[in-house]
Image: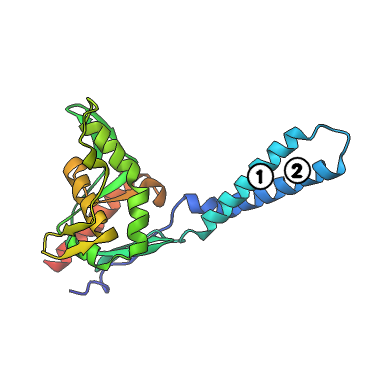
Amino acid sequence: MDNSDTLDTIEIKPVVNRYGLTLSLLGGVSALLSLVVIFLLTSIPKLPFYVMLGGSVFTLLLGLLKQLEPKVSLRLCPNYLQFYHRHGQWTLAWQDIQRIDIPTLGLEDNYQPLSYVGIRLTSQHRLLSNISLRLASRILLEQRPVLMQAIKNECADGTCPSELLFEGDQFTDDQGTHYTGLLAMLGQRMQRLREMLGYDIYLPENSLDRPAEEFIVLLRKYHSQVQQLDA
């Protein structure tokens, strides 16, 4: 069903990207001042200004990298949820989403929330069959810390089997589609994180435009509205 006439599209623009231009200007001006002092003022110690120059160049590069990030990280559309990354994008129909929440580590009453929004899928198939190899590779790399935290939580005595740290190059999803290479590794990673934390996909909090708790309220409300329109 097409809900585009009844629900507005919502774009999420990451807060961190708003500072890209500011960081670039700050780093560029600081680097220029450092160079002026180093080459023109010969009578003063230069070491502090070399340190300042290094920090300025780092700030400049960080700002430039921020400006290369997509201006919109997520788009909530009437028929799908879309995530944008500088290495690609993925799209999920709302019926593919089973649950949305903040993943936590710990046991019983001692819970530690992670800085991610977790999405549990009804099926892995749509994501794995449509994602690019380039983005799959980046997700495997960027979500490695989530896996390490989950393994550490699961194996508090330090006796985890080593195979938990690695993904193989063969995987069959819940609809019987077979994958090899990077897609197989991503499928295994999603399955492993689902078993450990309860979710397949993890959106980093720094990709949002508001606190994770508020974003979850927005996403759940939008998801619920879509379901009501489809009913």
Q: Position of residue 227 (x, y in %)?
A: 16, 62
- Name the side, left or right, on which 34 lies relative to 206: right
| Within-10-Å neighbours for mark 2: few <14, some 14–19, many 20+ | many
**What label does residue 34 carry, if any?**
2
Q: Which residue is denoted by mark 1 in the rendering?
A: 56
Question: What's the amino acid at mark 2?
Answer: Ser
Badge 1 element: helix
Work out whether residue 50 or residue 60 is closer to the camera in this orientation and state it: 50
Q: Residue at x 21, y 52 (%)?
A: 188
| Within-10-Å neighbours for mark 1: few <14, some 14–19, many 20+ | many
Work out whether residue 30 or residue 16 is closer to the camera in this orientation and state it: 30
CB under 8 Å between discs 2 and 1? yes
Q: Residue at x 80, y 41 (%)?
A: 38
Question: What's the amino acid at mark 1?
Answer: Ser
Work out whether residue 183 or residue 194 is closer to the camera in this orientation and state it: 183
Q: Against 221, is 151 above or below?
A: above
Q: Against 175, is 164 above or below?
A: above
